[in-house]
Amino acid sequence: MKDTDRIDPCLEKLLDDLKTVPDRDPGAAVRGRSRFLAEADRTWQAVSKREIPRLSRWKPFTQKESFTMNAIITIVVLAGLVFGGAGTVYAAQDDLPNEPLYPLKTMSEDVRLGLAADPQQEFNLLTEMAQTRATEMAMLVNSGITPPENVPQRLQQQTQQMLQLAANMDPAEMDAALQQLQTQLRTQTQLMTMLQSSANSEAVQLLEQTRSSLQDRLRLVEDGLADPEGFRHTVRNEKQPGLDDSTEPGYGNGADGEAIPANGNGFGNEDRESGKPEDQNGNGQGSGNGTGNGNQQQGQGSGSGNSIVTPTPVGPGLGGDGGKGGQGGNH
Amino acid sequence: MASESDLLQRARSFDHHALAELYDLYSPGLYRYAMRLLGHQQLSEECVADTFSRLLQALQARKGPDRNIQAYLYRITHNWIVDYYRSHPEEEAALEDDHAGDAPRPEDAAIQNLQAQHLRKVVRTLTQDQQMVIGMKYLEGLDNKTVALALGKPVGAVKSLQHRALASLKKILEDEGFI
């Protein structure tokens, strides 16, 4: 401290006594953070609702790129009408995974992703959505509720999609994206650790699994920042979970026997006994978020298997695996 | 870590990640600041929550800080504390003190808490700007530039405020026999 800042030692001693404060309660800190982010979501919805310029990016319906996108829009619009009007989708944005309009919330997210103008915008949306998943988990745990498995599954799937997008960006963009992802994954792994202190035993297990998975992705990102080419190679050649592992979360498409665009990210749980997808949990919620280059084909999606299927963006025909992922879950 | 201006820019477009980072970056310091002046954990949490809520409202209205968000947040927190004491004068003495003394014996800790409570009361007799200088500079250890930004005054004015604040504090505490 400079001379001009010198303070009487007795006064300094008294002020020092005020400096000692107890450690902040970690549970209260997490709850405060969750409330803030939830409020931010609500405020953002209000702001974005006012902003008309977004419409300028729309093309006429007939020019939209895929059948899947139109199908999803139709589903969302119909669902909105069935459940009570256009305001329903907006109202759903505040819902948590244990609330009735939550499926509408995730569907509307898929629509937003599908409308992304470019990979960078898609990456930004995914960043926001993954953070929303983490916040949802925090809010449920803080209310004494174990988050449904599809929430961490979706978080992991969105993280994986971000990795795939990053791996196909140019070097400067990829570096920025990986740095962003690194900070986000660090925050989320810390959150998963903090939440465990106030969670029940069932939730602790889920949180630990999620933390471990996010930590694994964080390591991949950190390696990627040191060795970008190695990262591209690893991500592009990574075994896609769910192609033959029926225990993984599912992102197949749900329309039986219908040809669905292969790079879809449908999301759902299966009824293992009947082999039928559960309608409420995402039957046919494919988002068609492929970022692939080349000759992507339409795959034969069937059912809604429990496996993460992330679009592989390189090479002809790889998108067809999206449908396979769905089938995998039905074994 | 992203630069502050980048963070602020992304926060302005309600980038969820940037907002989370802002919270993680500044809420611990703001909580400590509130605890030092309020001495109550739950109230301090409420103060931090309201501070960030007001930040969101400002961003929504396309207002808020163009730079140095830390100073901006401290200003909101301090105003909250001043408003609280203004609207709850009767609770000033009744407020249960969660201040953690470092005394090993309970009776010593109790005395330390009473002393802290009294010291907070003395600090509150200063002008609002003087309180902020004492709080931000001597309790939080922030530099003159940040304090000046929070007060919206030049650094020279902060030094002058600091001088007067310390002199006032010393006089009151001398009169009361604490020094």
Image (cartoon, rainbow, N blue to C red):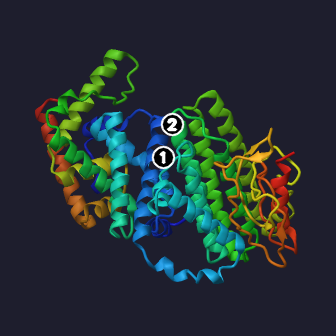
Q: Which residue is mark 1?
A: A34
Residue at 24 percent of width and 66 percent of height? B153
Question: The disc labelled 1 sits on which kind of residue?
Answer: Ser
Check disc 1: other Cα within 10 Å, few if <14, some if 14-19, many if 20+. Answer: many
Residue situated in front as seen by the camera: B159 or A119: A119
Query: Is residue B39 placed above or below B133 in the rendered structure?
Result: above
Q: CA distance from mark 2 to mark 1?
A: 9 Å
User: Can residue A233 be seen by looking at this rendering?
Assistant: no
Chain letter, disc 1 residue = A
| Numbered-mark total | 2
Judging from the image, what secondary structure is the residue with disc 2 in?
helix
Give how far across and how far down residue A35 sits, in percent.
44, 47
User: Can residue A120 be seen by looking at this rendering?
Assistant: yes
Quadrant in the rendering for residue A65: bottom right
The image's mark for residue A142 is 2
Give how far across and how far down residue A249 sits, in percent.
75, 48
Residue situated in front as seen by the camera: A69 or B113: A69
Q: Are marks 2 and 1 in contact (CB under 8 Å)?
A: yes
Residue at 36 percent of width and 53 percent of height? B53
Residue situated in front as seen by the camera: B37 or B77: B77
Left or right: residue A47 compared with residue A99: left
Give how far across and how far down residue B77 sits, in percent.
30, 50
Left or right: residue A85 compared with residue A208: left
Query: Is residue A113 placed above or below A34 in the rendered structure?
Result: below
